[in-house]
Every structure is written in structure tokens, then in C-alpha cells.
Image: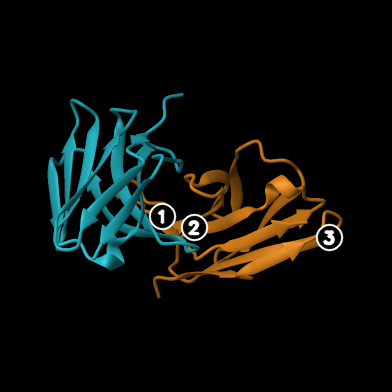
Amino acid sequence: GEDVEQSLFLSVREGDSSVINCTYTDSSSTYLYWYKQEPGAGLQLLTYIFSNMDMKQDQRLTVLLNKKDKHLSLRIADTQTGDSAIYFCAEIYSGTYKYIFGTGTRLKVLA
Amino acid sequence: DTEVTQTPKHLVMGMTNKKSLKCEQHMGHRAMYWYKQKAKKPPELMFVYSYEKLSINESVPSRFSPECPNSSLLNLHLHALQPEDSALYLCASSQVVAGVSNEQFFGPGTRLTVL
């Protein structure tokens, strides 16, 4: 099947905004999620968006969803060094338990 | 309590050993998951338990044997593993409620090395 695609790497300066992009596969996905994974750790849920929404804001995080293009993005405002991690998007098919994860984007924040 | 715990944190085993990974959650979640994650890759689903019954087995080799003794606990029994099974093993849990997000909460993982 198709992969959920993410760009491999993103580097930003501390204080700038970061935008991580994800192209997902299934227009019938009901929820889409963003997870953060620090080295050697598990996945931390950052936020999620329901498929009938275009945008969701949660403190420094803004999620944008373009269903027509099957495009999801995560904007992190005022990026800090502690935001350095791998970010995974994930979609879930309606009526299933199965996440389809994106390939992951490694975010590096330069001081 | 919004935590999923996993033990041990690290495990080194030989190919003839038998060991078990343990996972526990007290969020009242009725779905629990095992994932395998290789370096720089997304997690790969192995098993899903729903209401303590195995509902998904992603064609995992029989040297991995899951067990769900009750709604809070999930085990993964390991026997005769291969070096390529070395990975981070993640446990997750979620609600099982129609019409809500049912997001998965992950444990910190067990780093497994097979010699």
C-alpha cells in the first residue's frame, strides 16, 4: 500500500516556527494524530484532529488539515531546543484499531 | 493516572533464552497493543488485544507470544529470538469507544538486544 509520507529532516533556529508536513493515504481516515519521540523513548501524543476540522490550535501547536489534498501539517511556534525529536503523523481507518504511521521527520533545533 | 509502564527498560538475551516483556496501564483502556520499532523507522504493529481477546496479529512469527492476563496487563513472551529481532518494543493502550478519537498512549519501551 501507499506510505504516509513525511520529509525526513527539518532544521530550524531556536525561536523560529517549525512546520512539519505529512501526506496521508486514506481520505476516509477519521482522526489524524501527531506524536513526538525523543531518543530512546516512547511516543508522546501531542495532538490530534478530527477529519471534519480544518484547523486545531493547542498552545504552541497548530494543526492544519487539507482533506482534498490529503495533507496534514504541524506548526510549532517559538521552537525550543527541547522540541528536537522525531515527529510522526498517524492516521486511523474508520472502524479499526490500526494506526498507519508516517515515515517520521527529525526536527533539529539550533540554539 | 495517564501512564503506560513497561518492564524491563533494557533486555539482553541469547537466542536460546526465554524472556518476557511486561506492560501495565491503569487508565481503564480496553485495547492494548504491541509494536516493534527499528532505529529511525516508525513503529510496526504486532498485536492488538481488545477486551482481553487477541483481535489483530500482524503475521508475527510464533517466537513472539502475546498474553493479556487482565484488562490492565499485557505480556510479550519471547523464545528462540534472532538477532534481527533486536529493536525497541513499545506497548500502547487506548479506549474502545465509537465516535471518539481513541488515541493510543505509549509506554517508554523495552530496548531488546538479541545476541
Quadrant of image for the C terminus of chain A? bottom left
Badge 3 crowding class, 10 Å Cα cut-off, few under 14, some 14 to 19, many 20 or more, is few
Mark 2 belongs to which subunit?
Answer: B
In contact (CB < 8 Å): disc 3 and disc 2 = no
Dot 2 amino acid type: Ala
Dot 1 amino acid type: Gln
Q: Which one is in front, B12 or B32?
A: B12
Dot 3 amino acid type: Asn
**Mark pair 3, 2: CA separation:** 25 Å
Question: A15 left or right of B87?
Answer: left
**Mark pair 2, 1: CA separation:** 6 Å
Residue A86 in percent (x, y) is at: 38, 53
List the residue tagged with mark 2: B92
Question: B3 left or right of B6?
Answer: left
List the residue tagged with mark 1: B104
**From what the image shows, is residue A2 above or below residue B21?**
above
- Do pointers 3 and 2 mark residues of a single chain? yes
The mark that comes first in sequence, 1 or 3, is 3
Please report the residue visible at 33 percent of the width from the left and 45 percent of the height from the top.
A9
List the residue tagged with mark 3: B17
- Tag 1, which secondary structure? loop
In contact (CB < 8 Å): disc 2 and disc 1 = yes
- Do pointers 2 and 1 mark residues of a single chain? yes
Q: Quadrant of residue A24?
A: top left
Residue A39 in percent (x, y) is at: 45, 61
The mark that comes first in sequence, 2 or 1, is 2
